[in-house]
Image: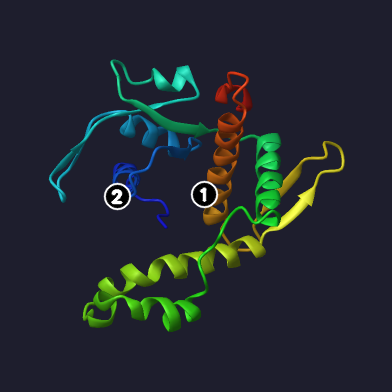
Amino acid sequence: SCQGGDTFLQALAIRRLYEDFNADYIVLDTRNGGLAILDMLSRTMYDEERMTEYSSLKCMNDDGYANRVRNNNGEEAIFRINANAKLNSDIAENFRRTLIEEKIDLLVNFAEAQEEILPQYKEYLSAIDVDEQLFYENPFLETQQLINESTSLVYEKMTETGVIKVHEQGNNRKDRYTSVSYGDYFASLLEKDLLDIESEYDFGVFIN
């Protein structure tokens, strides 16, 4: 959960997650500040806190974006999404289908985690520092926020185009919904690619 702020720090947070989870791909929304983050991820980054140098990564589904940073020979691991109304509609429908077909297992709610899961971690039980406790609690708290955020969104079907528009109510946000639904959309494309062994599948044809 990172709203606004320094784009370098956001890029660094993404790069850390990529390393910490031994990830294969980064799905990145390149609208607004996302383009600056893509440029930073496309260069060698130095993490002063961890005293680690991260190699450059490259956009995998758009040559124009891949070549924005010259002499970038990094791993093709960034899947960019620059969504329009139609693509956002497809993503929303895909995410709904994924949930109905139970292809995603969300974490249990925080109360259940406190009762059944967190007590299994000695480090959590012995933690004195609040930040250390939050390290274990945050995944469950963030999942609850994702559910609350998603169920508070308004889904509206446009009469003329038939596309689905998903928007917030009042001061609510949809950052978590966007992150998970975009990741789910990419996973669906990847799944189709892996299952369709008869043809050569091009990710780029799905992004306008």
Residue extending farthest to the right is 159
Please state if 64 lies on the left or on the right of 181 as rendered.
Answer: left
Q: Secondary structure at mark 1?
A: helix
Which amino acid is tagged 2? Asp
Relative to the observer, which residue lies in front, 143 or 7?
143
Q: Is residue 93 visible?
A: yes
At a point 55% along the width and 38% down the height, the residue shown is: 186
Image quadrant containing the C terminus: top right
Please state if 86 lies on the left or on the right of 15 as rendered.
Answer: right
Residue holding disc 1: 179
Relative to the observer, which residue lies in front, 170 or 50?
50
Q: Which mark is residue 20?
A: 2
Q: Secondary structure at mark 2?
A: helix
Q: Are marks 2 and 1 in contact (CB under 8 Å)?
A: no
Which comes before the other along the chain, label 2 or label 1? 2
Q: Cα distance, mark 2 to mark 1?
A: 18 Å
